[in-house]
Amino acid sequence: MKLQIYLQKSGVGSRRKCAGIIERGLVTVNGERQTVFWHEIEVGRDLVEVSGKAVSIVDEKFYYILNKPLGYVCANSDGFNTPTVFDFIRERYGIEEKLHSVGRLDKNTTGLLILTNDGDFTNAVIHPGRKVDKVYRALVKGIVSENQKKEFENGVDMDGYRTAPAKMEIIEETGDGNSLVEITIHEGKKRQVRIMCRSIGHEVVELQRIRIGNLTLDGVNEAGDLIKIDGEILFKRLGYNQKGWCSK
Ligand code: URA
């Protein structure tokens, strides 16, 4: 990260003010005076001081997209020592930052999962009024009839909670008498897709999330793939513009 941006993100002042501070020779990096605005700082490694006082980025936000592999939980712990997605990214990618997932996928669900340390962003995205599409591909047991599809789309009862209207598209009947369907919901209740499918008589065999808003698995095509994404791009793909979050 450029020195000037580093100072700004550390709360030293506006970009302009930081430029002035650098120009006046008040900044040292690892003990050496640094007057080049774009001098590259290795965040977390380099010691940056202004007038002899160390400054550091306290509030850098990180956003990652993971194609969640099978067998990992999104909670920090499930009490059974099941490996978590955070164990996975630490072991595979060396990511040590403290992150949380934006909503959860079950242990046996794969696909699109956002990981971040930005709690405000997470609350905004999972807010029930936001109605961001969450799209899943599900392989379900048996052949889904038109009536069952309608029943699903009108909303089903989940332990006294009526799910909001949803969408189901039947993609194909697989050779072995099962069905591949694409499901769109806006809510994020625990095990919602599995429970909704079961309630119309079709157990889920495999489940993958393929889209949230306009965010797809592009760039993370294989299970286990991870990319870091710029916050602004991510916000836009999830339906945020200058007027704020667009609700449906
Ligand atoms: N619905 C489910 O049943 N499981 C998930 O992981 C996500 C949505």
Image (cartoon, rainbow, N blue to C red):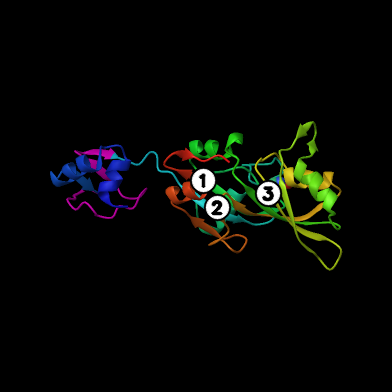
Which residue is the site of mark 3? Answer: 184
- Quadrant location of the C terminus in the rendered image: top right
Mark 1–mark 2 Cα distance, whole angstroms, equals 8 Å
For ligand 1, tell me if the residue under mark 1 lies within 8 Å.
Answer: no
Q: Is residue 19 left or right of residue 209?
A: left
Is residue 228 shown left or right of residue 105? left
Determine contact: label 2, label 3, CB under 8 Å.
no
Which residues are the magenta region?
30-54
Which mark sits nearer the N-terminus, 1 or 2? 2
Three-letter amino acid code at the position of disc 3: Thr
Quadrant in the rendering for residue 103: top right
Q: Nearer the viewer, residue 197 or 89?
A: 197
The numbered mark, 2 or 3, whose residue comes first in the sequence reads 3
Q: Which residue occupies the foreground of this view, 114 or 177?
A: 177
Disc 2 residue type (three-letter)? Asn
Q: Which residue is mark 1?
A: 239
Residue 173 spot, x, y in % from top left: 81, 63
Task: Decide: is 205 above or below 245.
Answer: below
Q: Residue furthest left?
A: 24
Residue found 52% across the figure and 41% down from its top: 246
Residue at 21 percent of width and 51 percent of height: 37
Q: Position of residue 68 (x, y in %)?
A: 62, 55
Q: In the shown orientation, is residue 163 left or right of residue 37?
A: right
- Residue 36: x percent and y percent? 19, 53
The secondary element bearing badge 2 is classed as loop
Mark seen at residue 214: 2
